[in-house]
Amino acid sequence: MGSEKSQADLTTSGLRFLLWWLPIASILLMQLAIGLDWLAPERWLFNGTWAIALLVMGSACLANAMHCNRVHCWFTGPYMLLMGLVMLLSLFHLLPGDPAPGMLANVAGLGTLVLWLVPELILGRYFGR
């Protein structure tokens, strides 16, 4: 049962590069560019990069959760989709209080990290049938 699920797990397949590592690399590159002042802090580019990356990864996590029942994907998928939507709303200044993009990025990144690690520490890697 465990090996059958791990074989169906997209996080262990060759697709993980396109579905997770490429979006993560784009986020990190954006963070580096902003941090080193290579770009003026362009809100549209920052928020757009984060939004697209979160929406891609969140969609992939939900597909993976339904495909193999990976525990963290049931938590990170909806969270990343929600944060991707929040970043899009922020891009168009549609959030109350117009929060800083960097603060939203911190919430998205730290929340995803916690939801990735903690559930599997408590519940294991895969939910049972």
Image: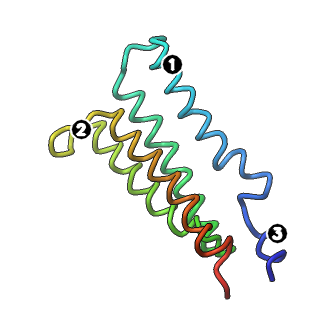
Which residue is tagged 2? 99
* Contact check, label 1 and label 2, Cβ < 8 Å: no
Image height of 75 relative to 51, above or below: below
Q: Earlier in the sequence, mark 1 or mark 2?
A: 1
Image height of 3 relative to 79, above or below: below
Which amino acid lies under the numbered mark 1 shown in the image of this protein?
Ala
Name the image quarter holding residue 126.
bottom right
Left-right relation of 89 to 118: left
Q: Earlier in the sequence, mark 2 or mark 3?
A: 3
Residue at x 42%, y 27% (from the top left corner): 45
Left-right relation of 110 to 19: left
The crowd level at tag 2 (other Cα within 10 Å; few <14, some 14-19, many 20+) is: few
Furthest toward the left, the residue is 97
The crowd level at tag 1 (other Cα within 10 Å; few <14, some 14-19, many 20+) is: some
Image height of 12 relative to 120, above or below: above
Disc on res. 33:
1
The crowd level at tag 3 (other Cα within 10 Å; few <14, some 14-19, many 20+) is: few
Whole-number angstrom distance, CA of label 1 to CA of label 3: 37 Å
Which amino acid lies under the numbered mark 2 shown in the image of this protein?
Pro
Q: Secondary structure at mark 2?
A: loop
Q: Where's residue 38, x and y in %?
A: 48, 11
Residue at x 39%, y 51% (from the top left corner): 83
Which residue is tagged 3? 7
Q: Where's residue 31, x and y in %?
A: 49, 27
